[in-house]
Image (cartoon, rainbow, N blue to C red):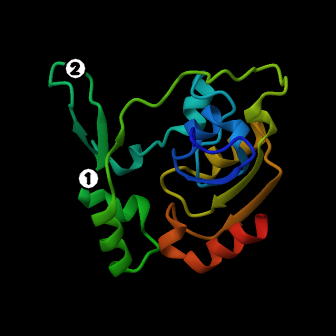
Amino acid sequence: MAALPDAHKVILVGHSAGGLSAMHLFGDKIKQAIFIAATMLPFGYQTEQDIKDGVPDLSEFGGDVYDLNFGLGEDHPPTSMVLRKEFQRPILYQQCSQEDSTLASILLRPFPAVLQTARFGCIDDGVKSPVNAVHRVYIKTANDRTLKVEQQEAMIHRWPPRKVMVMDTDHSPFFSAPDHLLELILGSL
């Protein structure tokens, strides 16, 4: 993104926690941001409400659902995490075929354990900034067990996008309903 020529802009498609930091860091280089079952917060994680809205609550699955990685050593906080194999299908891919769920599990990679809390230079009083100028579209996933519908709706209410669309899918519509997802993405442009 940093190397993109000044006159060029991209369409950013972010899923889950993906895309949030890129939008805040490179808002002036983004023509439109499409959030798919994604954390959509204007100023990063700042308040208890931001955490409630943007961080998955997987307590219904009982116990610890993550494998933690300690890249800086066991005496430091974890650096990355990944859902344990036995929880991946019921949490992320419950509407996918078994074959797609297996493929998705193979492709799943750890993600940062500490989410970015910096404000990325955004102004919280509504003043125009590159990130506030980005047109946003939100695609809700109605059967999401990761980012619950209530969480998605709360973020949409707090920072309304230009357009909201709904899919009757799990957290991973690119596996459970890829053709419909493509239609929605193309229809939002």
Going 81% across and 38% down the picture, which residue do you hit? 133
* Residue 152 x/y as whole percent: 65, 48
Q: Nearer the viewer, residue 95 or 11?
A: 11
Going 61% across and 32% down the picture, which residue do you hit? 25
Q: Which residue is mark 2?
A: 76
* Residue 159 x/y as whole percent: 76, 38
Count of number-bearing discs: 2
Q: Nearer the viewer, residue 48 or 80?
A: 80
Residue type at mark 1 is: Arg
* Residue 13 x/y as whole percent: 61, 55
Residue type at mark 2 is: His
Q: Earlier in the sequence, mark 1 or mark 2?
A: 2
* Residue 107 x/y as whole percent: 32, 63
Q: Quadrant of the C terminus?
A: bottom right
Q: Quadrant of the N terminus?
A: top right
Q: Residues within 10 Å of mark 2 (few under 14, many from 20)?
A: few
Find the residue positioned furthest to the left.
74
Judged by depth in the image, the label closer to the viewer, 1 or 2, is 2
Q: Nearer the viewer, residue 122 or 151?
A: 122
Residue 132 falls left or right of residue 39 = right
Q: Is residue 84 above or below residue 6?
A: below
Q: Which residue is mark 1?
A: 84
Q: Is residue 160 above or below residue 73?
A: below
